[in-house]
Amino acid sequence: MTLKTPSDVAFARQAAARAMGAIGASAIKTTKFVTAVSEIARNAVIYGRGGVISFTQTGPSGRQSVIAVCTDRGPGIEDISAAIADGYSTGKSLGLGLGGAKRLVDRFEITSSSRQGTKVTLECGPR
Amino acid sequence: MLESANPVPMMTINGCVIVAIRDDLDDQEIVSLQDQLVEEVAKRAAHGVVIDISALEIVDTFAGRMLAAMAQMARVMNARTIIVGMRPAVAMTLVELGMTLDGVETALNADRAVNAIVSGRSNTP
């Protein structure tokens, strides 16, 4: 799904919640994952000039997890480790989004370049 | 701009503005809620604000920052803000995010919040 406006971020949250529902995830895991997706999707809209997010399920049945992949067309992040650190922001925010998202999921990967934009992968299991 | 196209219902009883936030407001809608709330506090000369977030399945850094800002704005206007109905999963997630919502008062339910505001007693040490 496309990420361009604040309402797209809300749609991404709904899609994330549905995906977690489909794997029978607990309330706490669902809340954590949806919150992380919200942070990443907002970043793509605000800093990444818009982007795309997709959700897939992976793993054996009964122990599936949800993977969200978010890519944007932005200028990339110059210093990823600084961007993940709490309190770092090039905008007006609190600078907790990226690092917070990382803490909320089971697997977090980020790659970024000035030519290809930023790609964030989030994975979260059911429990 | 969808200005006030979808206002959040709020009412003022006994000098207390009461708002129940519905789930999944987008960032723009949260900002317009903030404007609406500050106007209501001024118009009604309210001395308290109760924000019910029990419908919210998530509070991310943006929503958290806006809630804290609403409480600060109300305080500047001499109104006390109490947030009620936070889900346990939301509380856990906020702490992991590093959002401590400093200076934001919370209560278990709207009943206690209104009582605390009306009686002028603090429900937190």
Image: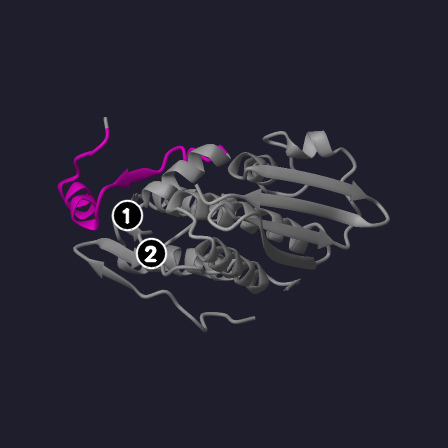
At 48% from the left and 62% from the top, the residue drawn is B29
In percent of width and height, residue B25 lies at 45, 60
In percent of width and height, residue A18 lies at 47, 60
In percent of width and height, residue B13 lies at 18, 58
Count of all numbered marks drawn on residues in the image? 2
Q: Earlier in the sequence, mark 1 or mark 2?
A: 2
**Magenta highlight on residue B100:** yes
The circle on residue B63 is none
Separation (CA) of disc 1 from disc 2 = 8 Å
In percent of width and height, residue B47 lies at 25, 48
Query: Is residue A9 found left or right of B79 in the rendered image?
Result: right
At mark 2, the secondary structure is loop
Toward the viewer: B118 or A87?
A87
Query: Which range is magenta?
Result: B98-124
Locate residue A105: give its quadrant.
top right
Q: Chain of mark 2?
A: B
Badge 2: few (under 14), some or many (20 or more) residues near its Cα, within 10 Å?
A: some
Query: Vertically, is A1 above or below B42?
Result: below
- Residue kind at label 1, given as amino acid type: Gly
At 84% from the left and 45% from the top, the residue drawn is A114
Kindly identify which residue carries mark 2. Answer: B55
**Magenta highlight on residue B44:** no
Kindly identify which residue carries mark 1. Answer: B85
At mark 1, the secondary structure is loop
Query: Is residue A43 found left or right of B101 in the rendered image?
Result: right
Locate residue A82: give its quadrant.
top right
- Residue kind at label 2, given as amino acid type: Ala
At 70% from the left and 50% from the top, the residue drawn is A47
How was the colour assigned to the protein in this rendering? one colour
Query: Is residue A67 found left or right of B64 in the rendered image?
Result: right
At 32% from the left and 66% from the top, the residue drawn is B9
